[in-house]
């Protein structure tokens, strides 16, 4: 299965009539493996900051998580595994795997919990596959 299929069929899937606003799979080196058309144009330093927070949990809390120039307030996650951010009625969930990061961006009516399930389930599956 191609990486784009994971984004199209598993991340941008329909959940009770709703879906993520944008999604991507990005390698630890900052390379885009696959992304939705709507995924924001990000800066390499934004990806570096996210990866640093996985190594040093809490490092994004004072500044916020930036993605495509949008600032998200960092909320509870799982140290070294998941980072969650909130902005208004939407937010972001980032799950780290062995080789990549799964990123999902959502807005209402999709709930934070639904976004987390979509992103983290795919991340867990990829971890089980050694990816």
Image: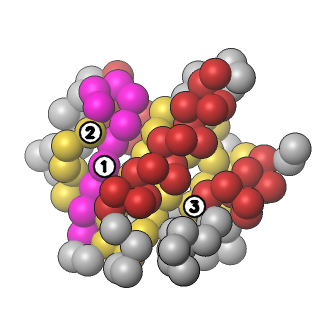
Per the rendering, the mark at residue 12 is: none
Query: Residue 42: x and y, percent?
Result: 51, 61
At label 2, counting other C-alpha atoms closer than 10 Å, the crowd grade (few under 14, some 14-19, many 20 or more) is some
CB under 8 Å between discs 1 and 2: yes
Using the image, determine if residue 49 lies above or below residue 19. Answer: above
Residue at image mark 2:
77
Provide the secondary structure element on which disc 3 rests. Answer: strand
| Residue 76 falls inside the magenta stretch | no
Residue at image mark 3:
23
Per the rendering, the mark at residue 84 is: 1
Q: Nearer the viewer, residue 7 or 53?
A: 7
Query: Residue 92: x and y, percent?
Result: 38, 59
CB under 8 Å between discs 3 and 2: no
Relative placement, left or right, of 118 versus 127 is left
Q: Earlier in the sequence, mark 1 or mark 2?
A: 2
Q: Earlier in the sequence, mark 3 or mark 1?
A: 3
At label 1, counting other C-alpha atoms closer than 10 Å, the crowd grade (few under 14, some 14-19, many 20 or more) is many
Q: Residue at x 26, y 77 (%)?
A: 89
Magenta residues, dominant SS class: strand
Q: Which residues are magenta?
A: 78-87
Q: Residue at x 51, y 49 (%)?
A: 119
């Amino acid at each position: 299965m191609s990486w784009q299929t994971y984004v199209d069929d598993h991340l941008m899937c329909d959940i009770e009539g709703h879906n993520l606003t944008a999604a991507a799979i990005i390698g630890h080196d900052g390379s885009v493996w696959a992304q939705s058309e709507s995924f924001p144009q990000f800066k390499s330093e934004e990806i570096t900051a996210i990866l640093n927070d996985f190594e040093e949990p809490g490092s994004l809390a004072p500044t916020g998580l930036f993605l495509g120039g949008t600032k998200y307030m960092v909320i509870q996650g799982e140290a070294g595994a998941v980072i969650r951010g909130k902005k208004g009625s939407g937010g972001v969930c980032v799950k780290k795997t062995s080789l990549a990061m799964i990123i999902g961006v959502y807005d209402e009516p999709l709930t934070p919990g639904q976004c987390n399930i979509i992103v983290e389930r795919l991340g867990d599956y990829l971890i089980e596959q050694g990816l």
